Image: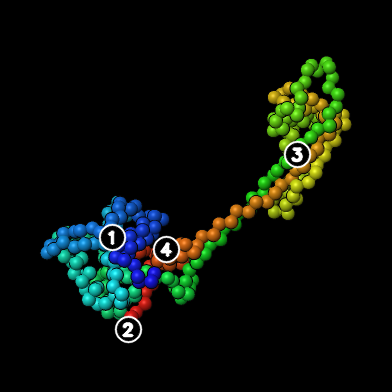
C-alpha cells in the first residue's frame, strides 16, 4: 500500500479484502456492497463498504469508511465518522464502524475512535515487527510413491490341443490377465510388482528388470478361462517418487497480517485486536 490509490480503487480494495477475510470465518456473509447511500436522522451518508453477515442467527452490519487523503488519519476525520454513525443510529440504522487508512493515523484519531467503539484498520505492507510470531509462508510437500510397470512379456509354453483353442495372450490387456499355478491365482500386475515395491518408510527401490520362472509352466487366465501357458513372466517394474509442492504466500501475506492470525493457527475477530497500526507525530 503506497497511499496513491484512487477513491474508487481504495473502496474496491477494501470490499475485496473484506470478502476474502469473511470467507474462512464462521460468520455467513449476507452481502458486501460498495458505495452505499444510507439515510440518517439529519442527512444522507455515503458509506464506502457495507458488510452484512450472520452469526448465531443474528444479522450484524459493519460500515467501512476509507480514508483516502495523503496525510495520516486525523482527529477531525475520526470525529466526522463518529458523527455519521451516530446520525445513522438515531435513524435506526445500526452497525459497527471501521476507519480504513493507507497513510497511518495520529494518536488523537485513534483515541477518538477507541472512545466511540470505532475500529481503525491500516492497510500497508507488513514490516518485520508485524510478522513477529506470525506465519509468513507455508510450503506443503507431499510425496507419492507410485507403483509402475513399463513393460511385460511372456515366454510361452506349448498349449495342449486338448485344452481347446486359446486366445493370443498379447492381444489381451495385461490388467485382465492372471497367472495360475499350484499355489493359486494372482494377477500379472501383482506378480510383476512383488518384491520391487518397498514397505512404507523404506527407501524407494526404483524401476528394475524382473523375471519370474515357472516349472512346470503356469496357466494364463482371462475371465476365468485358460488362454495360454508360460514358462516365464518378465519385464520392467518398480515404483517411482512424485513430489507435489505447493507454496502458500506471499500472495496471502497481507490477509494473514490483517486478520492477526498467529503462528499457532488461531484467529482473532476483525477489529482492534486484528489490526496493526503506527502513531503519527
Image marks 2 and 3: residues in contact by CB distance under 8 Å: no
* Circle 4 SS class: helix
Counting other residues with Cα less than 10 Å from the Cα at mark 4, is it few (<14), some (14-19), or many (20 or more)?
some
Q: Rounded to the nearest whole Å, what is the CA distance between mark 2 and mark 1?
A: 29 Å
Instruction: Compare residues 11 and 144 and report the one nearer the observer.
Output: 11
Which comes sooner in the sequence, label 2 or label 1?
Answer: 1
Query: Residue at 76% of width from left, 24% of height from top?
Result: 168
Residue at numbered disc 3: 151
Counting other residues with Cα less than 10 Å from the Cα at mark 3, is it few (<14), some (14-19), or many (20 or more)?
few
Residue at numbered disc 1: 49
Q: Quadrant of residue 161?
A: top right
Q: Quadrant of residue 39?
A: bottom left
On screen, residue 144 versus residue 232, left or right, reads left
Residue at numbered disc 2: 281
Q: Rounded to the nearest whole Å, what is the CA distance between mark 3 and mark 4?
A: 50 Å
Instruction: Compare residues 205 and 168 and report the one nearer the observer.
Output: 168
Which comes sooner in the sequence, label 3 or label 1?
Answer: 1
Instruction: Compare residues 89 and 81 and report the one nearer the observer.
Output: 81
* Circle 3 SS class: strand
Task: Single out the residue that lies furthest toward the bottom.
Answer: 281
Q: Quadrant of residue 21?
A: bottom left
Q: Position of residue 205 (x, y in %)?
A: 75, 50
Amino acid at each position: 500500500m503506497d497511499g496513491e490509490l484512487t477513491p474508487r480503487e481504495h473502496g474496491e480494495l477494501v470490499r475485496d479484502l473484506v470478502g476474502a477475510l469473511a470467507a474462512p470465518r464462521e460468520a455467513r456473509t449476507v452481502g458486501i456492497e460498495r458505495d452505499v447511500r444510507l439515510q440518517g436522522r439529519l442527512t444522507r451518508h455515503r458509506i464506502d463498504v457495507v458488510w452484512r453477515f450472520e452469526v448465531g442467527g443474528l444479522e450484524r452490519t459493519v460500515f467501512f469508511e476509507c480514508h483516502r487523503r495523503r496525510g495520516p488519519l486525523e482527529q477531525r476525520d475520526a470525529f466526522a465518522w463518529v458523527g455519521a454513525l451516530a446520525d445513522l443510529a438515531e435513524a435506526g440504522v445500526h452497525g459497527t464502524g471501521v476507519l480504513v487508512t493507507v497513510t497511518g493515523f495520529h494518536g488523537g484519531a485513534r483515541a477518538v475512535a477507541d472512545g466511540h467503539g470505532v475500529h481503525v484498520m491500516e492497510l500497508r505492507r507488513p514490516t518485520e515487527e508485524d510478522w513477529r510470531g506470525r506465519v509468513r509462508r507455508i510450503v506443503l510437500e507431499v510425496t507419492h510413491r507410485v507403483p509402475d510397470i513399463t513393460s511385460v512379456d511372456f515366454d510361452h509354453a506349448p498349449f495342449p490341443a486338448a485344452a481347446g483353442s486359446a486366445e493370443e495372450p498379447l492381444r489381451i490387456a495385461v490388467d485382465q490377465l492372471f497367472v495360475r499355478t499350484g499355489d493359486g491365482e494372482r494377477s500379472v500386475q501383482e506378480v510383476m510388482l512383488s518384491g520391487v515395491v518397498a514397505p512404507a518408510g523404506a527407501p524407494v527401490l526404483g524401476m528394475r528388470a524382473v523375471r519370474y520362472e515357472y516349472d512346470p509352466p503356469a496357466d494364463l487366465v482371462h475371465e476365468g478361462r485358460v488362454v495360454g501357458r508360460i514358462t516365464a513372466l518378465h519385464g520392467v517394474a518398480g515404483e517411482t517418487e512424485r513430489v507435489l509442492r505447493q507454496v502458500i504466500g506471499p500472495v496471502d501475506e497481507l490477509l494473514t497480517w490483517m486478520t492477526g492470525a498467529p503462528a499457532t493457527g488461531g484467529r482473532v475477530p476483525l477489529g482492534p485486536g486484528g489490526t496493526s497500526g503506527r502513531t503519527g507525530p
